[in-house]
Image (spheres, rainbow, N blue to C red):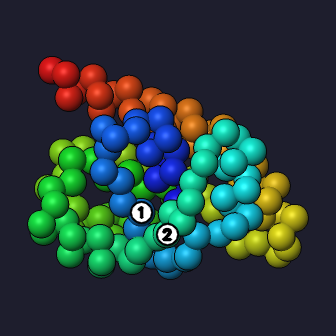
Amino acid sequence: PIATGMIKHIGGNEFNVSSACVNPQQSDEQLQSIMLEAGIAVTAVNSETIETVARNFKTTAFQYVITLDDQITDTHLKPFKFAHKGFKWNIHIPDFDSKETKVRFYKSLIPIIMEKAEEFVVEALDQKLK
């Protein structure tokens, strides 16, 4: 949901963004709060299973597929093999032993993902103009 929220924030209506995870979660209020502190208003950005998003892929051609978590494998990405381009951001997302650890981790992750999302949006919009 972090990358989804950032791409929607940066790219506006230029992108139709879906969020898929191996273990999807409902929108996390702590994460929403952290993103709001970073100036990104996200509301109810929920993840879906990769299988659900892949079913939608059959009716909506994805041009780009971005993987955030380093645990995503090529097997997970097979349903999206016809996407125009794939990006693996390979960020290790650990298990958290406390809320404080989780908050600290996500606060440190925001600028990293923001930079990657900005680079992605610039590249994708540049390709669109060609």
> Which corner quadrant of the image does residue 62 belong to?
bottom left
Image coords of residue 66 (percent x, y)? 38, 51
The Cα atoms of the two marked residues, 1 and 2, are separated by 7 Å
**In this orientation, does residue 109 appear?**
no
The amino acid beneath tag 1 is Ser
Of the pair 44 and 84, the residue shown nearer to us: 44
Image coords of residue 90 (percent x, y)? 51, 52
Q: Which mark is residue 127?
A: none
Q: Which mark is residue 46?
A: 2
Question: Residue at horizontal 69%, vertical 67%?
Answer: 29
Relative to 35, does residue 60 appear above or below in the rendering? below
Image coords of residue 109 (percent x, y)? 68, 47
> Which corner quadrant of the image does residue 75 belong to?
bottom left
Secondary element at image label 1: loop
Count of numbered circles in the view: 2
Relative to 45, does residue 118 appear above or below in the rendering? above
Circle 1 is placed at which residue position? 19
Of the pair 67 and 13, the residue shown nearer to us: 13
Of the pair 60 and 87, the residue shown nearer to us: 60
Secondary element at image label 2: loop
Question: Residue at horizontal 60%, vertical 48%?
Answer: 41
Question: Residue at horizontal 45%, vertical 43%?
Answer: 7
The amino acid beneath tag 2 is Asn
Relative to 128, does residue 53 appear above or below in the rendering? below
Q: Would you say 92 lies left or right of 16 here?
A: right
Mark 1 vs 2: CB contact within 8 A: yes
Query: In which quadrant is the C terminus drawn?
Result: top left
Q: Would you say 5 lies left or right of 34 here?
A: left
